[in-house]
Image (cartoon, rainbow, N blue to C red):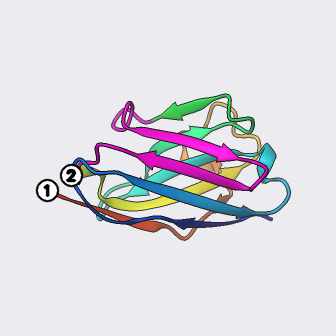
Amino acid sequence: QVQLVESGGGLVQAGGSLRLSCAASGRTFSIFTMGWFRQAPGKDREFVAAINWSGGGTYYGDSVKGRFAISRDNAKNTGNLQMNMLKPDDTAVYYCATSAGIYNDYRYPHRYNYWGQGTQVTVSS
């Protein structure tokens, strides 16, 4: 079992930055792919970013490429999402997720077995 807890959300003006963190419990986290997703009211859950177990592979949704950066520290069982140049369209609840055996399916929420409770990010114009 893995439990995830997100933090770092809040209210920020357009153009600003936020750093989200995801704290994981469970000794197998270090070998799992970690992903970030977001969901705005009335919309489907959207892939934001993912990172493989070693940190050597990172992947981003088209809408955040060049603005967001995903990272992880397996020694601390944490993952981070640095969000820069935020836009009002980035407003959503952000979730971290993890699972084993995802391989190239990192964009699909149904491939992740463990989810955090979510943290709200609101970007004002």
Residue identifier under label 2:
14
Q: Nearer the viewer, residue 1 or 13?
A: 13
Q: Amino acid at mark 1?
A: Ser
Q: Are marks 1 and 2 in contact (CB under 8 Å)?
A: yes
Q: Which residues are magenta?
A: 61-87
Residue 31: x and y in percent read: 80, 44
Q: Is residue 54 magenta?
A: no
The structure residue drawn at horizontal position 38% and vertical position 30%, both measured from the top left corner, is: 66
* x and y percentages locating residue 111 in the rendered image: 64, 47
Q: Nearer the viewer, residue 39 or 6?
A: 6
Left or right: residue 32 compared with residue 10:
right
Residue occupying image coordinates x 60% and y 59%: 22
Q: Residue at x 46, y 47 (%)?
A: 82
Q: Residue furthest right?
A: 27
- Where, quadrant-wise, is the C terminus in this rendering? bottom left
Instruction: Please identify the quadrant where the N terminus is shown.
Output: bottom right
* Magenta highlight on residue 80: yes
Q: Which residue appears farthest toward the left when viewing the image?
A: 125
Residue under circle 1?
125
Q: Which quarter of the picture shows residue 9?
A: bottom left
Q: Amino acid at mark 2?
A: Ala
